[in-house]
Amino acid sequence: MGKTAFVFPGQGAQYAGMGKDFYETYETARKVYDLAGRAAGLDVAQLCFTENDKLNITEYTQIAMLATEVAILKVMEELGGKADCCAGLSLGEYGALAAAGVMESEDLFRLIRSRGIYMQEAYPTGGAMTAVLGLDAETVGRICGETPGTVSIANDNCPGQLVISGEEEAVTAAAGRLLESGAKRCVPLKVSGPFHSALLKGAGEKLGRELENTAVRTPGIPYYCNVEAAQVTESHRVRELLTRQVYCTVRWRETVERMLADGVDTFVEIGPGKTLSGFLRRIDRSARAVNVETVEDLIKWRES
C-alpha cells in the first residue's frame, strides 16, 4: 500500500471567505484562527473571511493562508487524519512544519507574519517575476545565468511551468530570450517583490535571526523542504533551510518526484485552491490527488 502525503499551497491561492465554513463548524478551527490573530497582532479571521484590500498584500497573505491551512489540518488530525510525510510550496512549507510537529503553532504564526513583512519590505521597487510556460528547467536556468543582472528560477512547479525572479530589467531581458528559445508564453506576475531570488537574501537573514530564538523539534513525520527537494528528519537543519528558502529556488517538481520515488501515491492538498493538484497531474497523472478546502471536501475525504 502506498504512502499518503499532506501538501500545502503557497501564495496566490488565497480568496476572501477561505476557511470560513471550518471556523463556523469546528471549535478547533476557531481556536487556530484566534491563536493566529494573537500571534500576529491582527484580526486574522476578519482578514480571511471578508472582502478587503489587504488579503493580496504579501505581509497579510502569508498569515491568512497559514492560519487557514493549519485550521483545516488541526480539524483533520482531530478526526483521525494522518500522513506518512508532508511538504508545502513556499509559505506552504510552514503548513508542512505544522503537520510534522516541528514547531508550536504560535511560533509558526509569529514567524510567517515576520516573513511576510520582511519579504514585502526587502525590495519594494524595481523587482519582477514572470511565469515561463513550455520550457524545461535546464534551458531556463542557462538563459537566466547568461542574462546580465540578477535573474534566476524562483519556482520549478511542474514540467513546462517555471517562474523567474529578479531585477525588472533582467527579468524582461531573460523573458525575451526565453521566447526566442521556444517558450510558449512568458507572463509577468502581479507581485510585490522579486521573491525567491538573491535580492531577498537580506529578508532571509532577518528571518534567520528570529529562527535562532525559536524552539524546533525533530519532525514527527518526514517533511520535504523546498530548497533541497529532500526529506528533513533532523531538527538542526530546519532553521538554515527556512532561512535559505526566502531567497532560493522552490524546487517543487523535484520535491514531488522525490516523494513519488519514496512511495507516495496519494497527495492530500490542504487549504485554498487546487494549484498543487494541477501541478501533480503534470508530473505524474497516475498519482491520486485529494483536495480538502471546504467542510464538504472533508466529509468526502473521510468517506473515501
Image (spheres, rainbow, N blue to C red):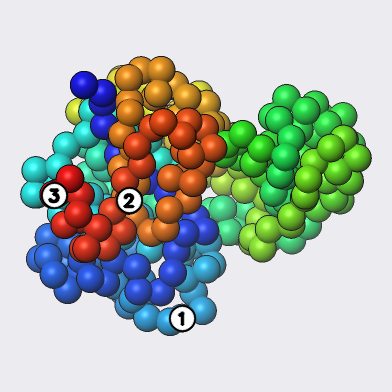
Q: Which residue is mark 3?
A: 303
Residue 31 image position (x, y, % from top left): 15, 63
Residue 272 image position (x, y, % from top left): 38, 59
Residue 58 image position (x, y, % from top left): 53, 61
The numbered disc on residue 291 is 2
Does the image show residue 61?
yes
Q: Within 10 angstroms of label 2, few (less than 14), some, or many (20 or more) residues?
A: many
In this rendering, the answer to whether 229 lies above or below 243 is above
> Dot 3: what SS?
helix
Residue 212 in which image quadrant: top left
Amino acid type, residue under disc 3 in the picture:
Glu
Asked whether 234 or 225 is in front, the reply is 225
Estimate the spatial distance between the alpha carbons at disc 2 and disc 3, rounded to whole Å: 13 Å
Q: Point out the tag, 3 or 1, that comes first from the N-terminus.
A: 1
Left or right? Give the position of 246 relative to 193: left
Residue displayed at 40% across by 23% down = 260
Q: Quadrant of the C terminus?
A: top left
Estimate the spatial distance between the alpha carbons at disc 1 and disc 2, rounded to whole Å: 26 Å
Residue displayed at 78% across by 57% down = 126
**Front disc: 1 or 2:** 2
Q: Which residue is mark 1?
A: 52
**Front disc: 3 or 1:** 3
Task: State yes or no: discs 1 and 2 in contact (Cβ < 8 Å).
Answer: no
Q: Quadrant of the N terminus?
A: top left
Amino acid type, residue under disc 2 in the picture:
Asn
Q: Within 10 angstroms of label 3, few (less than 14), some, or many (20 or more) residues?
A: few
The numbered disc on residue 216 is none
Asked whether 126 or 147 is in front, the reply is 147
Residue displayed at 28% across by 53% down = 292
